[in-house]
Image (cartoon, rainbow, N blue to C red):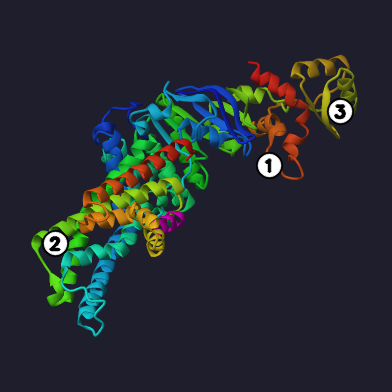
Amino acid sequence: MITLRGLTKRYGDRTAVRDLTLEVPAGRVTGFLGPNGSGKSTTMRMILGLDRPTAGVALVGGRPYGALRHPLREVGALLDAKAVHPGRSARAHLVAMARSNGIAVRRVEEVLDTVGLTAVAGRRVGSFSLGMGQRLGIAGALLGDPRVVMLDEPVNGLDPDGVLWVRGLMRSLAAEGRTVFVSSHLMSEMELMADRLVVIGRGRLIADAPVAEVIAGSSRNAVRVRSPRAGDLAALLAAEGVEVVEVEGWDLVAVEVSLERVGLLCHEHGIPLYELSAREASLEEAYMELTGASVEYGAAAGIPAAGAGARAGVAAGLGAVAGR
Amino acid sequence: MTAVMERAPGGSGDGVGEGGPGGFRGAVAAEWTKLWSLRSTWWGLVGAFVVMGVMCVILGGAVASNNTNAIAEDDQGVVAVGGIAVDAVDIVQFVVLTLAMLVITGEYSSGSIRSTLQWTPSRARMLLAKASVVAGVLFPVGVALGAVGTAVAYPMLGVWGRFSVGGAVSAALACGVYLALIGVFALGVGAVLRSTAGTLTTVFLLLMVVPMMLGSGGSKVMAHIADSLPSSAGRHFMKGDSVPYPAVAGLVILVAWVVAALWAGCVILRRRDA
């Protein structure tokens, strides 16, 4: 379990992480999301004792990282796959790592085999591709058979086969009762991998909830209707204060309204229905909506379509998620 | 590849922790493994021995030719063979120092310092482990360099060389002690400055340029300052001088510099984000 209490990091007058309080539970895959510069990496670095918090504490299994006698046997982490000397072989890197924490050196061959690097273990790390470096980083995270596994962008640079493998690995580590804390930019990947989500923006906690709850809290959850009198229905819904986001020919999409209510309304007014269905927001849409206001390095044109119409719903979505 | 870890989540235990004690000894073992798994270490050592050999050929030959040429003022007479090796250390030390400082500055330039601190979160333990390995490697290397230097200088000096086993052994041991200490000094400076180029420049100025400039000034105060710098203190120690202070005082001054550099390195490592 990872526990953060009031964790804060300031660089001069810029606050990278602001008063972060949360718990990452064991036995689950917890996804860690946030736009670029939102403080994800800084948070992870503070958990590992690499950066000193300005205020607050980060605890692993109830203790600060620096107080762990054999940290690699408690926490396996991959922060930056390039944090390896390029002139050293993958095997030598892992052997040094094992010796530093009193880990049996035979574990090195085991983890090399687990990540599929046995054949290239004698090669200098500097000659590795991004994906191979990533696999070496994951091997290092697994080396000490730790209870807590923390990975920053683990699928970065991996081929589809590797992505699938990492997903399975994360799930099985969590199934074994370990704490798995993973950041990623790939929402579709997170949706498949994570049980819970922690979302931060501009260093602040935006959401800390199960994936389903985050999606359910999105205002992008919508009702889709197909009817020859879609225009009439749009007017009726608008009169009842329901937001109709799209009317095109026979198709209509309304948000923040239940299927039952739309169905009853059509029945009462004799509007024929060809289709009435729920359209669930994707995690990506829910995420865009949550973080729309806190994108640090947004593109000049603003946020693309998925988030654009949803800005207004940020407050509602926030309330739904954070107020659980 | 799909065979994930079959073992139950154990944390510390379950056969994973059979590899030794971890802690400080583990940190030393890791530093040892890291040092010898880089080609730069081997090249650096080869370079140090080559430079030692070349320097002793030049210095030994210079003594012999000065004694036999027409100019009387430059005659040195018969010199101790081991003393030539000690003189050569003035130059050889920079090859050895580069090796020592790379133990930490190489990790900053490659980013692997973040891995090292993940393995050994205590900054003091990490730096002391590096210092132990640097000293442990450079002492025998320094002794061997002193021995090689003496062996090369002996035939170059010919009749102008005074050889005794005791003198050669003590010169070699002195080289070992000096290079081990000055290597740890460079490591401490490297921990403070992080960059290889910055550390090499600083150490070169402090060990070579500044003492030369102060010594050529002719002022007594400046000469005293020069004598208190680590390279001068080291030379007085290695040569077994009694002026300006006894050899053992030179050793004490050198050790004080080493302790100060390590302490500064520790303090700054603790304060700074990795």
Between tags 3 and 1, which lies in front? 1
Q: Which residue is mark 1?
A: A297
The residue beneath circle 2 is B168
Q: How far apart are labels 1 and 2 at the CA level?
A: 67 Å
Identify which residue, B256 or A204, lies in the foreground: B256
Q: Are marks 3 and 2 in contact (CB under 8 Å)?
A: no
Residue B141: tell me if it is visible. no
The outermost residue toward the left is B165
Q: Amino acid at mark 3?
A: Ala
Counting from the top left corner in percent of width and height, residue B9 is at 35, 26
* SS for callout 2: helix
Kindly identify which numbered label has been placed on residue A230.
3
Q: Which residues are magenta?
A: B197-206
Identify the residue at horizontal 65%, vertical 20% (top origin). A322
Which of discs 3 and 2 lies nearer the camera? The answer is 2
Q: Nearer the viewer, residue A73 or A310?
A: A73
Callout 3 crowding tier (Cα within 10 Å): few <14, some 14–19, many ≥20: many
Residue at 70 percent of width and 23 percent of height: A317
The residue type indicated by label 1 comes to Tyr
Asked whether A252 falls inside the magenta stretch, the response is no
**Residue B129 x, y percent position in the rendering:** 31, 41
| Kind of residue at badge 2 | Ala
Q: Earlier in the sequence, mark 3 or mark 1?
A: 3
Quadrant in which the N terminus of chain B is drawn:
top left
Q: Position of residue B233 (x, y in %)?
A: 29, 53
